[in-house]
Image (cartoon, grey):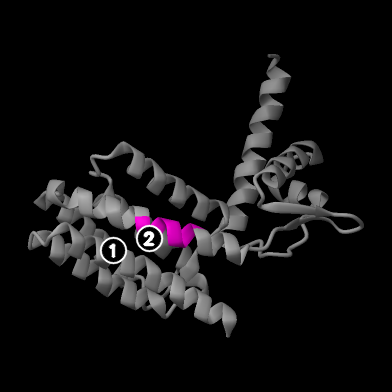
Amino acid sequence: MTEATMVAGSKSEQAYQAVKARIVEGTYTPGYRLVLSIIAKDLGFSVVPVREAIRRLEAEGLVTFERNVGATVAGIDPTEYLYTMQTLSIVEGAATALSAPLIDGSAIARARAVNEEMRGCLDHFDPVRFTQLNQDFHSVLFEHCPNPHILDLVHRGWNRLAAIRSSTFRFVPGRARDSVDEHENLLRLIEAGADADTIEKAARHHRAATLDAYLAQANH
């Protein structure tokens, strides 16, 4: 591989990461037209690496290409979101229940610190930051799952949510406060040594409540 190829590849990767971040964060909203020349100028690149980045994002489903329109940011498929959240509520609930006996005091303290940071986000709400912290919190609860197959399904669910840019709290910010309270309830159940069924139901209800809030908002 020549130095020129490596540089071009590097710029293509940078363009890909930059455009993807703007899509995930909501700077480029669904339907936003991605004009290659404007993005290239903004990033300080030629059009070539930006075009390569857009092609990668199209292959991932984040960008669509329409005749006479060009590249635009893809919308969020509500059906895909529904199925992903339903599946995640089941497998993450199971993973959390299986992890519970293995979660020690330091892990609970770490999760509680993340949850308090989430609580601190509520007054000046940042849905992207809140969503990242939400993932950090749940990772502490399911990362000790001794069943690697269930854990793999949980990771796939989270990755699928990221692929469809799901910051649910952007659409239902009122759900965020309840979510923080439910996190604390989960931690208390684990601390108290609650049985697996109780923990699994609480974790599943927590995920399902977020889905219900989103669906209610979408239908409205």
Residue nearer the viewer, 200 or 162: 200
State which tag comes first along the sequence, 1 or 2.
2
Q: Secondary structure at mark 1?
A: helix
**Image vertical order of residue 62 relative to residue 152, above or below:** below
Q: Secondary structure at mark 2?
A: helix
- Would residue 48 be counted in the magenta stretch? no
Residue nearer the viewer, 55 or 38: 55
The answer to whether mark 1 and mark 2 are in CB contact below 8 A is yes
Q: Amino acid at mark 2?
A: Ser
Prevailing secondary structure class for the magenta stretch in the rendered image: helix
Q: Residues within 10 Å of mark 1 (few under 14, many from 20)?
A: many
Rendered image quadrant of residue 120? bottom left
Residue with the most extreme bottom position:
220
- Would residue 88 be counted in the magenta stretch? yes
Which contiguous range is marked in magenta?
A: 84-90
Across and down, in percent, residue 160 comes to 51, 51
Checking the image for residue 203, the label placed there is 1
Q: Residues within 10 Å of mark 2 (few under 14, many from 20)?
A: many
Side (left or right) of 131 relative to 144: right
Across and down, in percent, residue 101 comes to 13, 50
Rendered image quadrant of residue 28? bottom right
